[in-house]
Image (cartoon, helix red, strand yellow):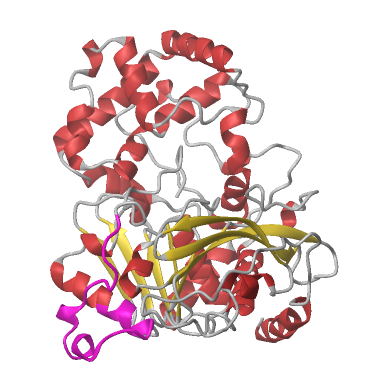
Protein backbone atom coordinates (compact mmCIF):
# COMPACT_ATOMS: atom_id res chain seq x y z
CA UNK A 1 0.00 0.00 0.00
CA UNK A 2 2.80 2.45 0.90
CA UNK A 3 4.58 1.79 -2.40
CA UNK A 4 1.33 2.34 -4.22
CA UNK A 5 0.72 5.62 -2.42
CA UNK A 6 4.24 6.88 -3.19
CA UNK A 7 3.67 6.02 -6.86
CA UNK A 8 0.33 7.80 -6.81
CA UNK A 9 1.82 10.91 -5.23
CA UNK A 10 4.34 11.06 -8.03
CA UNK A 11 1.61 10.45 -10.57
CA UNK A 12 -0.46 13.40 -9.36
CA UNK A 13 2.38 15.72 -10.37
CA UNK A 14 2.04 14.39 -13.91
CA UNK A 15 -1.73 14.68 -14.07
CA UNK A 16 -1.63 18.22 -12.68
CA UNK A 17 -1.25 19.35 -16.27
CA UNK A 18 -4.74 18.15 -17.16
CA UNK A 19 -6.66 21.02 -18.70
CA UNK A 20 -10.25 21.75 -19.47
CA UNK A 21 -11.67 23.07 -22.70
CA UNK A 22 -13.56 26.32 -22.69
CA UNK A 23 -12.03 27.87 -19.55
CA UNK A 24 -13.85 31.06 -18.71
CA UNK A 25 -12.27 34.38 -19.59
CA UNK A 26 -12.54 36.75 -16.64
CA UNK A 27 -12.32 40.48 -16.27
CA UNK A 28 -9.16 41.81 -14.65
CA UNK A 29 -9.97 44.19 -11.81
CA UNK A 30 -7.35 45.69 -9.55
CA UNK A 31 -5.44 43.49 -7.14
CA UNK A 32 -7.57 42.30 -4.26
CA UNK A 33 -6.72 43.38 -0.76
CA UNK A 34 -7.23 41.68 2.57
CA UNK A 35 -8.89 43.11 5.65
CA UNK A 36 -5.63 44.77 6.66
CA UNK A 37 -5.70 46.86 3.49
CA UNK A 38 -2.44 45.41 2.20
CA UNK A 39 -2.21 43.79 -1.20
CA UNK A 40 -2.44 40.00 -1.41
CA UNK A 41 0.72 38.04 -2.03
CA UNK A 42 0.41 38.24 -5.82
CA UNK A 43 0.14 41.44 -7.84
CA UNK A 44 -2.55 39.98 -10.09
CA UNK A 45 -6.22 39.63 -9.25
CA UNK A 46 -7.12 36.50 -7.26
CA UNK A 47 -9.50 35.29 -9.96
CA UNK A 48 -6.74 35.54 -12.56
CA UNK A 49 -4.52 33.48 -10.32
CA UNK A 50 -7.20 30.84 -9.85
CA UNK A 51 -7.93 30.65 -13.58
CA UNK A 52 -4.22 30.31 -14.32
CA UNK A 53 -4.38 26.86 -12.70
CA UNK A 54 -4.50 24.22 -15.47
CA UNK A 55 -7.98 22.72 -15.57
CA UNK A 56 -9.69 25.52 -13.60
CA UNK A 57 -12.63 27.44 -15.13
CA UNK A 58 -15.11 29.97 -13.80
CA UNK A 59 -18.80 29.19 -13.54
CA UNK A 60 -19.88 32.28 -11.63
CA UNK A 61 -18.69 34.97 -9.23
CA UNK A 62 -21.11 36.13 -6.53
CA UNK A 63 -20.48 39.23 -4.43
CA UNK A 64 -20.28 39.14 -0.65
CA UNK A 65 -19.02 41.97 1.54
CA UNK A 66 -15.50 41.35 2.79
CA UNK A 67 -14.94 38.37 0.50
CA UNK A 68 -14.93 37.27 -3.09
CA UNK A 69 -16.89 34.12 -3.82
CA UNK A 70 -16.29 31.97 -6.88
CA UNK A 71 -18.07 28.91 -8.25
CA UNK A 72 -15.52 26.99 -10.30
CA UNK A 73 -15.05 23.79 -12.25
CA UNK A 74 -11.84 21.80 -11.95
CA UNK A 75 -10.84 19.04 -14.34
CA UNK A 76 -10.30 15.75 -12.53
CA UNK A 77 -9.34 12.30 -13.83
CA UNK A 78 -12.17 9.79 -13.57
CA UNK A 79 -9.62 7.30 -12.29
CA UNK A 80 -6.64 8.70 -10.40
CA UNK A 81 -4.80 5.43 -10.98
CA UNK A 82 -5.20 5.79 -14.74
CA UNK A 83 -5.52 9.53 -15.44
CA UNK A 84 -5.30 9.07 -19.19
CA UNK A 85 -8.67 7.28 -19.22
CA UNK A 86 -10.90 10.32 -19.22
CA UNK A 87 -11.77 13.34 -17.09
CA UNK A 88 -14.81 15.04 -15.59
CA UNK A 89 -15.61 18.50 -14.26
CA UNK A 90 -15.73 18.75 -10.48
CA UNK A 91 -17.50 21.75 -8.99
CA UNK A 92 -15.76 23.65 -6.21
CA UNK A 93 -16.27 27.03 -4.59
CA UNK A 94 -13.75 29.46 -3.15
CA UNK A 95 -14.65 31.97 -0.46
CA UNK A 96 -11.62 34.24 -0.73
CA UNK A 97 -10.58 36.54 2.09
CA UNK A 98 -6.83 36.99 1.86
CA UNK A 99 -3.97 34.74 0.78
CA UNK A 100 -2.22 35.80 3.99
CA UNK A 101 -4.89 33.93 5.99
CA UNK A 102 -5.22 30.16 6.60
CA UNK A 103 -7.58 28.11 4.44
CA UNK A 104 -10.34 25.70 5.44
CA UNK A 105 -11.09 22.83 3.04
CA UNK A 106 -14.74 21.83 3.42
CA UNK A 107 -16.93 19.13 1.97
CA UNK A 108 -20.35 17.94 3.09
CA UNK A 109 -19.82 14.66 1.24
CA UNK A 110 -22.70 15.43 -1.13
CA UNK A 111 -23.52 18.42 -3.33
CA UNK A 112 -21.74 21.74 -2.89
CA UNK A 113 -23.75 24.86 -2.17
CA UNK A 114 -23.24 27.73 -4.59
CA UNK A 115 -24.40 30.27 -1.99
CA UNK A 116 -21.63 31.97 0.03
CA UNK A 117 -21.35 30.39 3.46
CA UNK A 118 -18.71 29.97 6.14
CA UNK A 119 -18.20 26.81 8.13
CA UNK A 120 -17.42 27.04 11.84
CA UNK A 121 -13.64 26.48 11.51
CA UNK A 122 -13.51 29.19 8.84
CA UNK A 123 -15.07 31.67 11.26
CA UNK A 124 -12.77 30.52 14.06
CA UNK A 125 -9.58 31.10 12.05
CA UNK A 126 -10.95 34.04 10.01
CA UNK A 127 -9.73 32.41 6.83
CA UNK A 128 -10.48 31.43 3.28
CA UNK A 129 -12.70 28.49 2.47
CA UNK A 130 -12.50 26.00 -0.38
CA UNK A 131 -15.56 23.74 -0.72
CA UNK A 132 -15.68 20.61 -2.88
CA UNK A 133 -18.61 18.75 -4.38
CA UNK A 134 -18.20 15.00 -3.86
CA UNK A 135 -17.55 13.06 -7.04
CA UNK A 136 -20.61 11.53 -8.78
CA UNK A 137 -23.03 14.04 -7.25
CA UNK A 138 -24.39 15.98 -10.19
CA UNK A 139 -23.11 17.96 -11.95
CA UNK A 140 -19.76 16.56 -10.77
CA UNK A 141 -20.38 13.18 -12.42
CA UNK A 142 -18.49 11.56 -15.29
CA UNK A 143 -20.56 10.78 -18.36
CA UNK A 144 -20.85 7.86 -18.78
CA UNK A 145 -20.55 7.08 -15.08
CA UNK A 146 -18.20 4.22 -14.19
CA UNK A 147 -19.48 3.56 -10.67
CA UNK A 148 -16.48 1.42 -9.80
CA UNK A 149 -14.53 4.69 -9.63
CA UNK A 150 -16.65 5.98 -6.77
CA UNK A 151 -14.77 5.05 -3.63
CA UNK A 152 -13.17 6.80 -0.68
CA UNK A 153 -9.65 6.71 -2.13
CA UNK A 154 -10.69 8.26 -5.43
CA UNK A 155 -12.57 11.01 -3.56
CA UNK A 156 -9.60 11.65 -1.27
CA UNK A 157 -7.44 11.91 -4.37
CA UNK A 158 -9.84 14.54 -5.75
CA UNK A 159 -9.20 16.60 -2.63
CA UNK A 160 -5.48 16.02 -2.83
CA UNK A 161 -5.28 17.36 -6.38
CA UNK A 162 -7.39 20.41 -5.51
CA UNK A 163 -5.14 21.09 -2.53
CA UNK A 164 -2.01 20.74 -4.67
CA UNK A 165 -3.45 23.11 -7.26
CA UNK A 166 -4.42 25.79 -4.71
CA UNK A 167 -1.57 25.51 -2.21
CA UNK A 168 0.78 27.75 -4.24
CA UNK A 169 -1.85 30.52 -3.96
CA UNK A 170 -3.10 29.82 -0.45
CA UNK A 171 0.26 28.94 1.07
CA UNK A 172 -0.57 29.31 4.77
CA UNK A 173 -1.94 26.54 7.00
CA UNK A 174 -4.88 24.38 5.88
CA UNK A 175 -7.62 22.77 7.99
CA UNK A 176 -10.01 20.20 6.52
CA UNK A 177 -13.56 19.94 7.83
CA UNK A 178 -16.97 18.50 7.13
CA UNK A 179 -20.15 17.42 8.85
CA UNK A 180 -21.61 13.89 8.88
CA UNK A 181 -20.60 12.29 5.57
CA UNK A 182 -18.38 15.32 5.18
CA UNK A 183 -16.71 14.50 8.50
CA UNK A 184 -16.20 10.97 7.25
CA UNK A 185 -14.74 12.39 4.03
CA UNK A 186 -12.32 14.63 5.94
CA UNK A 187 -11.20 11.56 7.89
CA UNK A 188 -10.65 9.44 4.79
CA UNK A 189 -8.70 12.27 3.16
CA UNK A 190 -6.44 12.45 6.20
CA UNK A 191 -5.98 8.68 6.17
CA UNK A 192 -4.77 8.59 2.54
CA UNK A 193 -2.98 11.96 2.40
CA UNK A 194 -1.87 12.66 6.00
CA UNK A 195 0.71 15.26 4.99
CA UNK A 196 -1.68 17.63 3.20
CA UNK A 197 -3.63 19.20 6.07
CA UNK A 198 -2.40 20.86 9.25
CA UNK A 199 -5.53 19.82 11.15
CA UNK A 200 -8.89 18.08 10.78
CA UNK A 201 -12.22 19.12 12.35
CA UNK A 202 -14.81 16.38 11.74
CA UNK A 203 -18.36 16.89 12.91
CA UNK A 204 -20.84 14.08 13.75
CA UNK A 205 -18.93 11.55 11.63
CA UNK A 206 -20.28 7.95 11.78
CA UNK A 207 -17.79 5.10 11.83
CA UNK A 208 -19.44 1.80 10.87
CA UNK A 209 -16.46 -0.50 11.37
CA UNK A 210 -18.37 -3.79 11.28
CA UNK A 211 -21.39 -3.43 9.03
CA UNK A 212 -23.36 -6.32 10.51
CA UNK A 213 -22.89 -5.31 14.16
CA UNK A 214 -25.25 -2.46 14.99
CA UNK A 215 -26.27 -3.10 18.59
CA UNK A 216 -24.87 0.30 19.60
CA UNK A 217 -27.80 1.92 17.80
CA UNK A 218 -30.32 -0.23 19.66
CA UNK A 219 -28.75 0.78 22.96
CA UNK A 220 -28.90 4.42 21.90
CA UNK A 221 -32.63 4.33 21.13
CA UNK A 222 -33.35 2.61 24.44
CA UNK A 223 -31.86 5.53 26.36
CA UNK A 224 -31.98 8.73 24.29
CA UNK A 225 -33.99 11.69 25.62
CA UNK A 226 -36.77 10.88 28.08
CA UNK A 227 -39.08 7.90 28.34
CA UNK A 228 -42.08 10.15 27.68
CA UNK A 229 -40.58 11.37 24.41
CA UNK A 230 -39.49 7.90 23.34
CA UNK A 231 -42.97 6.55 24.05
CA UNK A 232 -44.63 9.26 21.96
CA UNK A 233 -42.38 8.64 18.98
CA UNK A 234 -42.66 4.86 19.21
CA UNK A 235 -46.44 5.04 19.41
CA UNK A 236 -46.78 7.22 16.31
CA UNK A 237 -44.40 4.97 14.38
CA UNK A 238 -46.30 1.85 15.38
CA UNK A 239 -49.67 3.45 14.63
CA UNK A 240 -48.51 4.34 11.11
CA UNK A 241 -47.94 0.63 10.48
CA UNK A 242 -51.22 -0.38 12.12
CA UNK A 243 -52.97 2.01 9.71
CA UNK A 244 -50.93 0.90 6.74
CA UNK A 245 -53.89 0.26 4.45
CA UNK A 246 -55.68 3.62 4.72
CA UNK A 247 -52.46 5.64 4.83
CA UNK A 248 -51.05 3.83 1.79
CA UNK A 249 -54.16 4.96 -0.09
CA UNK A 250 -53.27 8.51 0.90
CA UNK A 251 -49.70 7.81 -0.24
CA UNK A 252 -50.88 6.48 -3.61
CA UNK A 253 -52.95 9.60 -4.20
CA UNK A 254 -50.04 11.78 -3.13
CA UNK A 255 -47.69 9.95 -5.52
CA UNK A 256 -50.11 10.18 -8.42
CA UNK A 257 -50.62 13.89 -7.85
CA UNK A 258 -46.87 14.54 -7.90
CA UNK A 259 -45.85 12.03 -10.56
CA UNK A 260 -43.84 9.87 -8.18
CA UNK A 261 -42.85 6.30 -9.09
CA UNK A 262 -41.30 3.40 -7.15
CA UNK A 263 -39.23 1.38 -9.64
CA UNK A 264 -35.93 1.47 -7.73
CA UNK A 265 -37.24 0.47 -4.29
CA UNK A 266 -39.71 -1.93 -5.88
CA UNK A 267 -43.15 -0.88 -4.65
CA UNK A 268 -45.15 1.77 -2.88
CA UNK A 269 -45.49 -0.62 0.07
CA UNK A 270 -41.71 -0.87 0.45
CA UNK A 271 -41.37 2.89 0.23
CA UNK A 272 -44.11 3.47 2.78
CA UNK A 273 -42.50 1.21 5.35
CA UNK A 274 -39.05 2.71 4.74
CA UNK A 275 -40.41 6.20 5.45
CA UNK A 276 -42.19 5.05 8.61
CA UNK A 277 -39.17 3.17 9.96
CA UNK A 278 -37.00 6.28 9.47
CA UNK A 279 -39.32 8.29 11.72
CA UNK A 280 -37.77 7.83 15.16
CA UNK A 281 -34.22 8.00 13.84
CA UNK A 282 -35.06 11.12 11.83
CA UNK A 283 -36.54 12.86 14.85
CA UNK A 284 -33.45 12.45 17.00
CA UNK A 285 -31.10 13.24 14.13
CA UNK A 286 -32.66 16.60 13.37
CA UNK A 287 -34.77 17.60 16.40
CA UNK A 288 -34.16 18.46 20.03
CA UNK A 289 -35.76 17.07 23.15
CA UNK A 290 -37.89 20.22 23.39
CA UNK A 291 -39.46 19.31 20.03
CA UNK A 292 -41.19 16.30 21.57
CA UNK A 293 -44.15 18.57 22.22
CA UNK A 294 -44.81 18.58 18.47
CA UNK A 295 -45.38 14.79 18.44
CA UNK A 296 -48.98 13.57 18.89
CA UNK A 297 -49.37 12.62 22.55
CA UNK A 298 -52.11 10.02 21.97
CA UNK A 299 -51.27 8.21 18.75
CA UNK A 300 -54.01 5.61 19.05
CA UNK A 301 -56.69 8.30 19.07
CA UNK A 302 -54.99 10.64 16.61
CA UNK A 303 -56.54 11.13 13.18
CA UNK A 304 -55.05 9.59 10.06
CA UNK A 305 -54.10 13.10 8.97
CA UNK A 306 -52.24 13.75 12.22
CA UNK A 307 -50.26 10.51 11.88
CA UNK A 308 -49.51 11.18 8.20
CA UNK A 309 -48.42 14.76 8.87
CA UNK A 310 -46.10 13.81 11.71
CA UNK A 311 -44.42 11.06 9.69
CA UNK A 312 -44.19 13.24 6.57
CA UNK A 313 -42.75 16.21 8.47
CA UNK A 314 -39.93 14.17 9.96
CA UNK A 315 -39.27 11.42 7.39
CA UNK A 316 -40.71 12.80 4.14
CA UNK A 317 -42.97 10.61 2.02
CA UNK A 318 -41.38 11.93 -1.17
CA UNK A 319 -37.95 10.51 -0.48
CA UNK A 320 -38.11 6.80 -1.32
CA UNK A 321 -39.69 7.54 -4.68
CA UNK A 322 -37.52 7.23 -7.78
CA UNK A 323 -37.44 10.99 -7.96
CA UNK A 324 -36.29 11.33 -4.35
CA UNK A 325 -33.67 8.60 -4.48
CA UNK A 326 -32.03 9.44 -7.80
CA UNK A 327 -29.93 12.44 -6.64
CA UNK A 328 -28.56 10.35 -3.77
CA UNK A 329 -27.59 7.26 -5.73
CA UNK A 330 -23.87 8.03 -5.08
CA UNK A 331 -24.40 7.89 -1.32
CA UNK A 332 -26.32 4.63 -1.34
CA UNK A 333 -23.78 3.13 -3.72
CA UNK A 334 -21.00 3.98 -1.26
CA UNK A 335 -23.03 2.77 1.73
CA UNK A 336 -23.48 -0.57 -0.01
CA UNK A 337 -19.87 -0.91 -1.15
CA UNK A 338 -17.67 0.64 1.58
CA UNK A 339 -19.30 2.88 4.18
CA UNK A 340 -21.82 0.44 5.61
CA UNK A 341 -25.36 1.21 6.76
CA UNK A 342 -27.17 0.73 10.08
CA UNK A 343 -29.94 -1.68 10.91
CA UNK A 344 -31.88 -1.45 14.16
CA UNK A 345 -34.52 -3.41 16.05
CA UNK A 346 -38.04 -2.17 16.78
CA UNK A 347 -39.04 -3.87 20.03
CA UNK A 348 -42.13 -1.67 20.38
CA UNK A 349 -43.60 -2.96 17.10
CA UNK A 350 -44.98 -6.47 16.54
CA UNK A 351 -43.06 -8.36 13.89
CA UNK A 352 -46.28 -8.95 11.97
CA UNK A 353 -46.48 -5.21 11.25
CA UNK A 354 -42.99 -5.02 9.75
CA UNK A 355 -42.68 -6.55 6.29
CA UNK A 356 -39.15 -5.56 5.28
CA UNK A 357 -37.27 -3.95 8.18
CA UNK A 358 -34.43 -1.55 7.50
CA UNK A 359 -33.71 -2.19 3.85
CA UNK A 360 -30.12 -2.44 2.61
CA UNK A 361 -28.56 0.23 0.36
CA UNK A 362 -28.85 -2.19 -2.57
CA UNK A 363 -32.61 -1.51 -2.58
CA UNK A 364 -32.04 2.20 -3.16
CA UNK A 365 -29.69 1.92 -6.14
CA UNK A 366 -30.86 1.07 -9.67
CA UNK A 367 -30.25 -2.60 -10.42
CA UNK A 368 -28.14 -1.89 -13.49
CA UNK A 369 -25.43 -0.53 -11.17
CA UNK A 370 -23.46 -3.45 -9.73
CA UNK A 371 -22.40 -3.37 -6.07
CA UNK A 372 -20.14 -5.49 -3.90
CA UNK A 373 -19.41 -4.69 -0.26
CA UNK A 374 -15.78 -4.27 0.83
CA UNK A 375 -15.67 -4.96 4.60
CA UNK A 376 -12.00 -4.05 4.92
CA UNK A 377 -12.44 -0.39 3.92
CA UNK A 378 -13.83 0.93 7.21
CA UNK A 379 -11.69 -1.40 9.33
CA UNK A 380 -8.62 0.11 7.68
CA UNK A 381 -9.72 3.69 8.36
CA UNK A 382 -10.74 2.93 11.95
CA UNK A 383 -7.40 1.31 12.70
CA UNK A 384 -5.52 4.17 11.09
CA UNK A 385 -7.34 6.81 13.13
CA UNK A 386 -6.76 4.96 16.40
CA UNK A 387 -3.06 4.54 15.73
CA UNK A 388 -2.13 7.60 13.68
CA UNK A 389 -4.55 10.47 14.35
CA UNK A 390 -2.63 13.73 14.58
CA UNK A 391 -4.27 17.14 14.96
CA UNK A 392 -7.75 15.64 14.56
CA UNK A 393 -10.86 16.84 16.38
CA UNK A 394 -14.20 15.01 16.40
CA UNK A 395 -17.40 16.63 17.66
CA UNK A 396 -20.58 14.60 18.26
CA UNK A 397 -24.08 15.40 19.51
CA UNK A 398 -25.32 13.58 22.61
CA UNK A 399 -28.75 12.89 21.07
CA UNK A 400 -27.60 12.17 17.51
CA UNK A 401 -28.12 8.50 16.51
CA UNK A 402 -25.14 8.58 14.15
CA UNK A 403 -22.84 9.16 17.10
CA UNK A 404 -23.65 5.72 18.49
CA UNK A 405 -20.94 4.34 16.22
CA UNK A 406 -18.21 6.95 16.21
CA UNK A 407 -14.50 7.40 15.72
CA UNK A 408 -12.42 6.70 18.79
CA UNK A 409 -8.78 7.41 19.52
CA UNK A 410 -6.12 4.90 20.47
CA UNK A 411 -2.70 5.13 22.10
CA UNK A 412 -1.12 6.15 18.79
CA UNK A 413 -3.17 9.34 18.53
CA UNK A 414 -1.43 12.68 19.09
CA UNK A 415 -2.96 16.06 19.90
CA UNK A 416 -6.39 14.70 18.90
CA UNK A 417 -9.77 14.82 20.62
CA UNK A 418 -13.31 13.42 20.66
CA UNK A 419 -15.91 15.68 22.29
CA UNK A 420 -19.67 15.37 22.77
CA UNK A 421 -22.02 18.37 22.82
CA UNK A 422 -24.67 17.81 25.54
CA UNK A 423 -28.27 17.71 24.34
CA UNK A 424 -27.39 18.41 20.71
CA UNK A 425 -28.29 16.47 17.59
CA UNK A 426 -26.71 16.05 14.14
CA UNK A 427 -25.97 19.77 14.12
CA UNK A 428 -23.50 19.58 17.02
CA UNK A 429 -20.55 21.94 16.79
CA UNK A 430 -17.71 23.41 18.81
CA UNK A 431 -19.92 26.27 19.98
CA UNK A 432 -22.22 23.70 21.63
CA UNK A 433 -19.53 22.07 23.77
CA UNK A 434 -19.21 22.65 27.48
CA UNK A 435 -17.05 25.68 28.27
CA UNK A 436 -13.68 24.04 28.91
CA UNK A 437 -13.95 21.71 25.90
CA UNK A 438 -15.14 24.58 23.70
CA UNK A 439 -12.12 26.65 24.67
CA UNK A 440 -9.72 23.75 24.20
CA UNK A 441 -11.17 22.86 20.79
CA UNK A 442 -11.09 26.48 19.65
CA UNK A 443 -7.51 26.93 20.83
CA UNK A 444 -6.34 23.78 19.04
CA UNK A 445 -8.00 24.84 15.78
CA UNK A 446 -6.32 28.25 16.04
CA UNK A 447 -3.00 26.59 16.82
CA UNK A 448 -3.22 24.13 13.93
CA UNK A 449 -4.12 27.00 11.60
CA UNK A 450 -1.10 28.98 12.74
CA UNK A 451 -3.12 31.93 14.04
CA UNK A 452 -3.20 31.35 17.82
CA UNK A 453 -2.07 34.43 19.70
CA UNK A 454 0.56 34.25 22.42
CA UNK A 455 -2.25 34.73 24.94
CA UNK A 456 -4.20 31.74 23.61
CA UNK A 457 -1.08 29.59 23.46
CA UNK A 458 -0.43 30.35 27.12
CA UNK A 459 -4.08 30.11 28.19
CA UNK A 460 -6.46 28.05 25.98
CA UNK A 461 -9.46 29.34 27.96
CA UNK A 462 -8.95 32.70 26.23
CA UNK A 463 -9.58 31.21 22.78
CA UNK A 464 -12.42 32.69 20.73
CA UNK A 465 -13.30 32.78 17.02
CA UNK A 466 -11.29 35.46 15.24
CA UNK A 467 -14.12 36.54 12.93
CA UNK A 468 -17.36 38.09 14.14
CA UNK A 469 -20.50 36.02 13.67
CA UNK A 470 -22.34 36.78 10.43
CA UNK A 471 -25.99 35.72 10.50
CA UNK A 472 -26.08 35.02 6.76
CA UNK A 473 -22.60 33.61 6.28
CA UNK A 474 -22.44 31.52 9.46
CA UNK A 475 -25.75 29.67 9.36
CA UNK A 476 -25.58 27.03 12.10
CA UNK A 477 -28.67 25.04 11.18
CA UNK A 478 -28.15 21.30 11.03
CA UNK A 479 -27.24 20.12 7.53
CA UNK A 480 -30.45 18.23 6.87
CA UNK A 481 -30.43 15.40 4.36
CA UNK A 482 -33.73 13.62 3.61
CA UNK A 483 -34.25 10.10 4.92
CA UNK A 484 -31.80 8.01 6.88
CA UNK A 485 -28.41 9.28 5.73
CA UNK A 486 -25.42 10.83 7.51
Asked whether 247 falls inside the magenta stretch, the response is no
The residue stretch that appears in magenta:
443-470
Side (left or right) of 46 relative to 432? right
Q: x%, y% of residue 237?
A: 33, 26
Q: Is residue 328 above or below residue 188?
A: above
Q: Residue at x 31, y 60 (%)?
A: 396
Q: x%, y% of residue 315?
A: 40, 31
Q: Residue at x 85, y 69 (%)?
A: 84
Which quadrant of the view contains residue 418?
Answer: bottom left
Q: Nearer the viewer, residue 71 or 414?
A: 71
Q: Is residue 370 above or below residue 443?
A: above
Residue farthest toward the right in the current orientation of the protein:
84
Q: x%, y% of residue 2?
A: 65, 85
Asked whether 446 falls inside the magenta stretch, the response is yes
Q: Residue at x 49, y 81 (%)?
A: 40
Residue farthest toward the front in the current orientation of the protein:
30
Amino acid sequence: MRKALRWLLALTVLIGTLSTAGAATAAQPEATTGTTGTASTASTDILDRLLAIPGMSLVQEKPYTGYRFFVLNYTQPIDHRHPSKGTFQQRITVLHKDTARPTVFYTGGYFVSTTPSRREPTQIVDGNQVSMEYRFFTPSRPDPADWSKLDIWQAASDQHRIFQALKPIYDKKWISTGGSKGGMTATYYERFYPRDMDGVVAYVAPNDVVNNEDSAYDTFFENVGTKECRDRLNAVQREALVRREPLEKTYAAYAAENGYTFTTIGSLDRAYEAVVLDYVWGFWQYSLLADCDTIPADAVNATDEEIWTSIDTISGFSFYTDQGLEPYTPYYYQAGTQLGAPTIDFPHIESSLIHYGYQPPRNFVPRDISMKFQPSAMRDVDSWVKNNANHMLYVYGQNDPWGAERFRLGKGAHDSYVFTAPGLNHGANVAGLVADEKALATSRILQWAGVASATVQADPSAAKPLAKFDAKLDTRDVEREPALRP
